[in-house]
Image: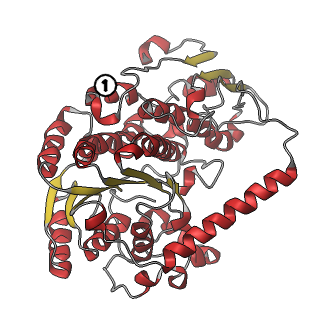
Amino acid sequence: MWEAVDGVDIGVAMNNAGLGQPGSVFLHEADLEAWVRMITGEPAGWCWGYMMERGRGAVVNVGSAASEAIPSLPLYSVYVATKRYVHTNTKHTHACDRKIDQFISSRNVGQFFWGLHVEYASKGIDVHCLVVAPMAWWFRSLAFLGAACVASVTLRLLAYLALSLRRPNDMRLSYGAWAVVTGPTSGIGRSIALELARRGMNLVLVGRDPANLREISDTIRSRHGVQTKTVVFDLSLVSTAHGEEPLRRLREAVEGLDVGVLVNNAGVAQPYAMRLHEADVEAWVRMMRVNLWAVTEVTAAVLPGMVERGRGAVVNIGSASSEATPSFPFYTVYAATKRYVAQFSRSLHVEYASKRIHVQCQAPLFVATRMVAKFMEASWLSPFVVSADDYACAAVGWIGHGGALCGRTYRTSSRGALPPSCRTLPSTGSSYGRTPGAEDSV
């Protein structure tokens, strides 16, 4: 494709290709390759370099109102999540002199280019969001909206207080004896693994570094006396020939185990802060494999056992960068992948509720890991930064509670605001000074 467009005066790029098959099915019922075909693709910025040279152009990304007009679309979870990714991939590009326009052909095609909206303002690139879905009635009563907001905040506060004051659930009794955690060797993943073990859960630890896996496995067994299994799996190889064997080993590792909890924590933010066209495409593809494809494949591998036993909990670690802010410039692809995780979780939450499987996306903000090290340098942000241990205690406490999107845990800003069961925790060794690896999530 690069050779075909080289030297051509490209003025309009239409990203229309899409796939809706296998249609209306549960995630675990379809062949994994069908989902991989649906979500495989490169970032939509292949033509930006040519347009930037001429300072003009238009890009049209075709999404679907299925990811924006309704909160969830059960039985089409992956399709809706991919379109939400396009939505997050299109909301982010605007420029002062309006020489390059990006039109969004549906209300769901937005957040990616909203980050680019800020990033490319100085490059003469203009992006608009053309909303064709019907707008909300303008005459909705302000009093009704105010009352609804107050009621929502009040209910959330009461729910948080109830959770903080109650005794912790017996997770083995509620869900099962085993938990699977991806990216458990550092940062949030390490702290969550230790917290689950403290609550009596046996662990299947999935990571890319054998030495680090052995270290966290030995630490968990010595401190908490639970069983552990390790699976060496470089999640950046998902959907490649080299990823088939470790995926098979993961399925074998969980086969026959009473797996009740899955925590999809592994994620990458590299290549960090830069414009879309400045990084090698392979870096974006690697990020999508870990943050997006791996979440889908690991969930599909673990869900069948939960369905068979009629209970379980799936926790996908998202990011407030895709939920709490309208855009996240220079981290556009990262925020877009995390928005996929949120939409994927919302739909699975409804899809598997009848099977007694609780699916939840937790969206932390400032947690003390290497990913937020630069933000932590600002002294005024320090009251809002929690250690990975404190976050993990609150996060595990929310498993099975609340809706599909749980952003409450990132609002905890000090030990005093944590539930009583978290305030007496011994240190797990994962704190501000620790240097997390790539398998860590903000």
Q: Give percent across and percent down for residue 285.
A: 38, 37
Judging by the rendered image, the residue that carries numbered circle 1 is 34
Is 219 positioned to the left or the right of 408 in the image?
A: left
Q: Quadrant of residue 295?
A: top left
Identify the residue at horizontal 18%, vertical 42% (top origin): 247
Query: What's the coloring here?
Result: secondary structure
* Image label count: 1
Q: Give percent across and percent down for residue 5.
A: 49, 14
- The secondary element bearing badge 1 is classed as helix
Nearer to us in this view, 53 or 301: 301
Nearer to us in this view, 117 or 400: 400
Q: Is residue 408 visible?
A: yes
Identify the residue at horizontal 55%, vertical 65% (top origin): 408
Q: Give percent across and percent down for residue 28.
A: 29, 36
Is 353 positioned to the left or the right of 276 in the image?
A: left
Residue type at numbered disc 1: Ala
Q: Quadrant of residue 229?
A: bottom left
Is 406 positioned to the left or the right of 139 in the image?
A: left
Is 335 positioned to the left or the right of 139 in the image?
A: left
Q: Is residue 385 visible?
A: no
Identify the residue at horizontal 64%, vertical 26% (top origin): 106
Q: Give percent across and percent down for residue 397.
A: 42, 70
**Relative height, residue 252 to residue 106 (above, below):** below
Image quarter hosting the N terminus = top left
